[in-house]
Amino acid sequence: MARRSGAFALVAALCLLELARRGLADEPAVPAMFVFGDSTVDVGNNNFLANCKLVCRANYPRYGVDYPFQSPTGRFSNGYNLADQIAQNLGFDKSPPPYLSLPDVTIISQMSKGINFASGGSGLLDSTGGAVCTEVFNMSAQVQSFTSAVQKMGNGTADLISKSLIFINTGSNDLFEYTDIPSNTTRNDTEFLQSLVVFYKSHLKELYGAGARKFSVVSPSLVGCCPSQRAIARAKNDLDGYGCYRAANGLSRQLYPMLDSMLRGLAADLGGMRYSLADSVRMAELIFNGTVLPGANFTVLDKPCCGGGGGTGVCNRTAALCEDRRAYLFWDNNHPTEAASRVAALELFADPGVFVHPINVRELAELRT
Ligand SMILES: *[C@@H]1O[C@H](CO)[C@@H](O)[C@H](O)[C@H]1NC(C)=O
Ligand SMILES: *[C@@H]1O[C@H](CO)[C@@H](O)[C@H](O)[C@H]1NC(C)=O
Ligand SMILES: *[C@@H]1O[C@H](CO)[C@@H](O)[C@H](O)[C@H]1NC(C)=O
Ligand SMILES: *[C@@H]1O[C@H](CO)[C@@H](O)[C@H](O)[C@H]1NC(C)=O
Ligand SMILES: *[C@@H]1O[C@H](CO)[C@@H](O)[C@H](O)[C@H]1NC(C)=O
Ligand SMILES: *[C@@H]1O[C@H](CO)[C@@H](O)[C@H](O)[C@H]1NC(C)=O
Ligand SMILES: *[C@@H]1O[C@H](CO)[C@@H](O)[C@H](O)[C@H]1NC(C)=O
């Protein structure tokens, strides 16, 4: 039953997308889009961090093998990532450019079209990513860069910022790092997740304070199902029914309702705030349950297309590469393929209420503020 309703949601979503495309033929649905978060939506910010380690960069082949001109832009994908695909659904060519690539003098003019602040390895906690990457553009720095850019623009920006879409995908790296803590240390999962939600809330409030009103928030997916986490699960003998890391997936499942209730509360408190929350846990379940989706037929769900190595391999110039990238859910050991994020983008944009609440991104974009 659940499987059927999921597949139905996607068929309906495809129809809605056609309607949406027609409506949006001329102009994007929002004046600008601002992106925050981690490697699922980074389009090259990490390329500009001098101390960011190679494992937290994607600006070398085989990244980008399906991107125009096969450019390794810093996207952790074979092609376009989720930020690009949401932007495309809204009527843009792709994600706005990475903030750290912009010369100071261009920031004000670029603000009217949108900027991407996301950084691979970062999380809700500013300390997340430090150990793995040495340097990331942390969430507080992402948000502060946005608010100071808004201030630089001065008067007359309120309308632009309030009509624009704020797109956020973060939290997975916090969960990865938490599950890495040795099991003989005392931990309280609920307390940890509550602290993540507190940080999420304060970042959202700061964005709201700068004039943002339309928020698309993506909850962390079943992070324990990445090939790298499946390897850890095997080593620790902590497998769930999908052959994934039970502890990590448990955190994702516990976090979603907490984010949901935080957003409900925040929207009730902050006048004019509107949001769309994507339940990535259920979206992932649908795929792991074996549902064949319209326009997507993933046959390899547990191995990466690039750099296998039983979950520990590196995707680089010499790594083995799969032939049919559209058949793979994972591009490398930690990131989805372009095909997988396209499915997610379509759901976020046009889902009629199964995976995205209380409204989808198309509806959010079209609201008058
Ligand atoms: C977050 O980034 C800011 C700006 O780069 C930096 O000053 C701060 O130390 C970072 N925080 C942590 C905990 O790394
Ligand atoms: C913005 O407008 C307010 C009141 O209209 C004025 O006091 C302020 O100086 C203006 N700021 C800028 C940066 O123009
Ligand atoms: C936890 O175990 C590791 C080795 O597995 C040990 O080095 C460490 O001291 C232990 N920590 C505590 C708090 O017992
Ligand atoms: C974990 O933290 C929560 C929230 O602070 C608390 O209610 C709960 O009792 C704690 N659990 C344990 C086992 O300490
Ligand atoms: C996936 O299958 C599980 C086990 O049958 C079920 O509990 C869950 O609701 C399904 N999820 C979706 C999104 O279909
Ligand atoms: C999905 O792909 C597999 C392998 O290529 C194929 O056997 C199967 O028939 C396809 N299913 C659908 C519904 O297209
Ligand atoms: C690619 O990664 C493999 C495995 O980590 C490593 O042995 C090889 O040297 C790397 N190749 C390049 C060109 O960096």
Image (cartoon, rainbow, N blue to C red):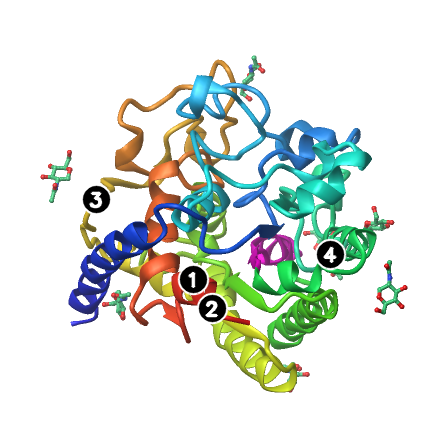
Which label number is shown at residue 143? Answer: 4
Label 2 close to label 1 by CB (< 8 Å): yes
Which label number is shown at residue 361? Answer: 1
Is the residue marked by circle 3 packed among few (<14), some (14-19), or many (20+) residues within 10 Å?
few
What is the secondary structure assignment of the residue under circle 3?
Answer: loop
Estimate the spatial distance between the alpha carbons at disc 3 and disc 4, rounded to whole Å.
35 Å
Estimate the spatial distance between the alpha carbons at disc 1 and disc 3, rounded to whole Å.
20 Å
Q: Please report the residue visible at 64 percent of the width from the left and 72 percent of the height from the top.
A: 197
The stretch in magenta equals: 164-182
First in sequence, mark 2 or 4: give its number. 4
Task: Tell me if residue 243 can be seen.
Answer: no
Q: Quadrant of ligand 2?
A: bottom right
In the image, 211 versus 219, the foreground residue is 211
Estimate the spatial distance between the alpha carbons at disc 2 and disc 1, rounded to whole Å.
6 Å
First in sequence, mark 1 or 3: give its number. 3
Give the percent coordinates (x, y) of residue 170.
Answer: 58, 56
Q: Quadrant of the N terminus?
A: bottom left
Q: Please report the residue visible at 75 percent of the width from the left and 41 percent of the height from the top.
A: 107
Give the percent coordinates (x, y) of residue 225.
Answer: 41, 51
Task: Tell me if residue 34 can be seen.
Answer: yes
What is the secondary structure assignment of the residue under circle 4?
Answer: helix
